[in-house]
Amino acid sequence: MSQIKLVKPTLEYAKDIMKYRQEFLDSGDSLDGCGSLRACSSAEEWICELNTLENTETCPDDKVCSNTFLAIRLSDTKIVGIIDFRHHIDHPILSVLGGHIGYSVRPTERRKGYATEMLRQNLMNCKQYGLEKVLVTCDFGNIASKKTIITNGGIFEKEIVVDGDKIERYWIHL
């Protein structure tokens, strides 16, 4: 795996943000950890929405404050993943199946260890923010995500069923 760093999305990465989005749309995969990227028609629109979520003064009432980061490969500055962390999960969906952290890895960059490193770096952000533990969930059949969570200290809490889908809940103590 090449080295990566987590950076706040900026227009510097606009072209690659939209390529990232298109790769997911073409593959039919979900854009976990990307907020509204699927629905946005431009990187600028997406970045504006992310900026409103960063603090309580601008965060809409139906959302929770969060920070989103691009995982940038240092060797070529390509986006290999996107990850977010929600400042709290006092929300009917997040407290059950969304958790504190969501992430995705570009389909063409999977199975290279990026998700594990993204989560490791983001856990440091969570700790700096003051969180003591975080809830991370994954679909029952998503073995790669399960391994990523466990490698980063995830402790299995329970399995739940939501709309017929099995979800695994893990807690990571920071």
Image (cartoon, rainbow, N blue to C red):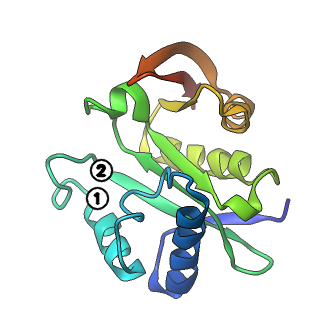
Query: Three-letter amino acid code at disc 2?
Result: Cys
Q: Evaluate if marks 1 and 2 touch, with contact meaning CB atoms under 8 Å apart.
A: yes
Between 4 and 21, the one nearer to me in the picture: 21
Against 17, is 89 above or below? above
Between 14 and 38, the one nearer to me in the picture: 38
Left-right relation of 45 to 100: left
| CA distance separating discs 1 and 2 | 5 Å
Q: Name which quarter of the figure residue 114 lies in.
A: bottom right
Disc 1 on helix, strand or loop? loop
In the picture, the disc for residue 106 is none
Query: Three-letter amino acid code at disc 1?
Result: Leu
Q: Which image quadrant: the N terminus? A: bottom right
The percent position of residue 110, horizontal first and vertical second, equals 75, 55
**Residue marked by disc 2:** 65
Left-right relation of 59 to 150: left
In the picture, the disc for residue 53 is 1
Left-right relation of 84 to 138: left
